[in-house]
Amino acid sequence: MKSKKYILTIIIGSLVGILTLMGQKYLPINLNFLANSTSMWLIPAFLIPYIFKTDKKASIILSISSLVFCVLGYYVFEAIFNNHTFEVSRTIIFWLICAVAGGIVFGLGAYYSNKEQNIIKYVSMNLLPAVFISEGLYKLIHIKEYQHMVIGIILQIIIGLILYFVIANKEAIKKKNILSIVGLVILGTFAFNILFSKLEF
């Protein structure tokens, strides 16, 4: 049973990486940034261990595996699609390091989301939706730079809200959970502001 979880994770991760490349190439410009956003890769990285209710170690491994195969699926298929040799570049190494770091964070998030009610549980449950809502809000705040992707931005926020209600379920309307998502979204929006300002060169 355990091996089936890992095989499923590898397949899903690889497919998400491939779909990302296809989305970048074929989606219209106002939706294209959804394919460019690594937030989409975090969905299986969080939901697979969350749904399977795995232990801490397995949650981290599943989350890391999902993200690693998102990266590999993307770059291997890109090499095949564009008919060139696949090489392990600095960019790939960078994203693999990010996959390990993100897998640890979101694997732990998925694990603690299934635990007893406390502040760690609420923060963990809201990690994934907060990423989507925060990135969307950041782009709305800087709408002059993102006017060409308004539909995609709104969709990203909607996805975040859907994830919030799906993951939180009956906890969604609890005061502690609402305060948690609001706090994470505020922090996330500031984080995206710093991140994107650093990436402008």
Image: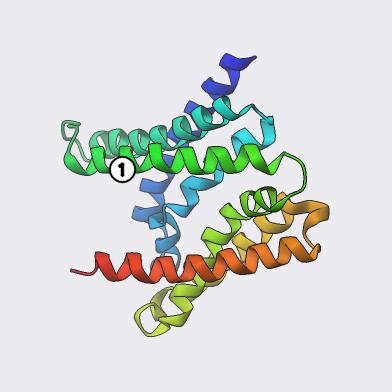
**In the rendered image, which quarter contains the C terminus?**
bottom left
- Count how many numbered circles sit on residues in the image: 1
Q: Residue at x 22, y 40 (%)?
A: 82
Can see residue 176?
A: yes
Q: Residue at x 62, y 66 (%)?
A: 158
Write the residue at 59% across / 43% down.
109
Q: Residue at x 48, y 79 (%)?
A: 140
Instruction: Give the vertical position of 66 relative to 127 (above or below).
Output: above
Q: Is residue 156 left or right of residue 102?
A: right
- In the picture provided, is 49 more to the left or to the right than 75? right
Query: Which element is circle 1 on?
Result: helix
Q: Residue 122 appears at what percent x and percent y?
A: 69, 53
Q: Quadrant of residue 171?
A: bottom right
Q: Quadrant of residue 129?
A: bottom right
Amino acid of disc 1 = Trp
Instruction: Decide which of 84, 165 is in the foreground and name it.
Output: 165
Residue 85 is left or right of residue 121, and the answer is left
x, y percent for residue 115: 73, 39
Percent position of residue 187, x then y: 50, 67
Mark 1 lies on residue: 95
Residue 145, located in which quarter of the rendered image?
A: bottom left
Q: From the image, which quarter does the N terminus lie in?
A: top right
- Label 1 packing within 10 angstroms: few (<14), some (14-19), many (20+): some
Please, is residue 11 above or below residue 19 in the view? above
Between residues 190 and 23, which one lies in front from this camera angle? 190
* Relative image position of residue 69 (x, y in whole percent): 40, 32
Front one among 160 and 184: 184
Examine the rendered structure and indicate whether residue 26 appears above or below residue 106.
Answer: below
